[in-house]
């Protein structure tokens, strides 16, 4: 859960935007979508959970293993931009 944490705590002091809010106030989460999430039963369960969280006003970010291992800087940048939206 992202809410109640500072950008520096979430991203690390070196990665947090200098003008990020002191504390995140919109609930949110980050999910890692590994290979197991491609199975039909997992897709249905994940979609249901995601929809419920968004209905509860959560801001969710889902990343695949290809993004996590291939584009970690882009993930940090996207999360950093999201934190800026929370102002």
Image (cartoon, rainbow, N blue to C red):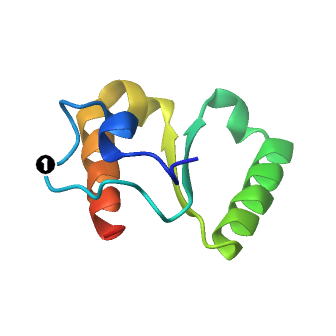
Residue beneath the point at 34% across and 50% down: 79
Identify the residue under disc 1: 18
Q: Position of residue 25 (x, y in %)?
A: 47, 63
Residue 36 percent location from the top left of the image? 71, 30
Q: Is residue 41 left or right of residue 67?
A: right
Position of the C terminus, as image quadrant, is bottom left
Check the image and name the residue furthest to the left: 18
Please report the residue visible at 61 percent of the width from the left and 73 percent of the height from the top. Answer: 57
- Badge 1: how crowded within 10 Å, few (<14), some, or many (20+)? few
Q: Quick check: 64 left or right of 14?
A: right
- Observer-nearest of 19 and 30: 19
Compared with 32, 7 (above or below) is: below
Seen from the viewer's position, the closer of residues 59 and 44 is: 59
Residue in the image at 69% along x and 75% along y: 55
Task: Name which residue lies at 81% across and 46% down.
Answer: 40
Q: Quadrant of residue 73?
A: top left
């Amino acid at each position: 859960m992202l809410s109640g944490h500072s950008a520096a705590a979430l991203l690390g002091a070196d990665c947090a935007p200098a003008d990020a809010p002191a504390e995140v106030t919109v609930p949110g989460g980050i999910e890692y979508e590994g290979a197991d999430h491609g199975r039909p039963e997992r897709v249905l369960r994940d979609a249901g959970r995601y929809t419920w969280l968004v209905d509860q006003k959560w801001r969710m970010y889902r990343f695949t293993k290809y993004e996590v291992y291939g584009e970690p800087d882009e993930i940090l940048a996207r999360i950093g931009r999201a934190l800026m939206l929370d102002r």
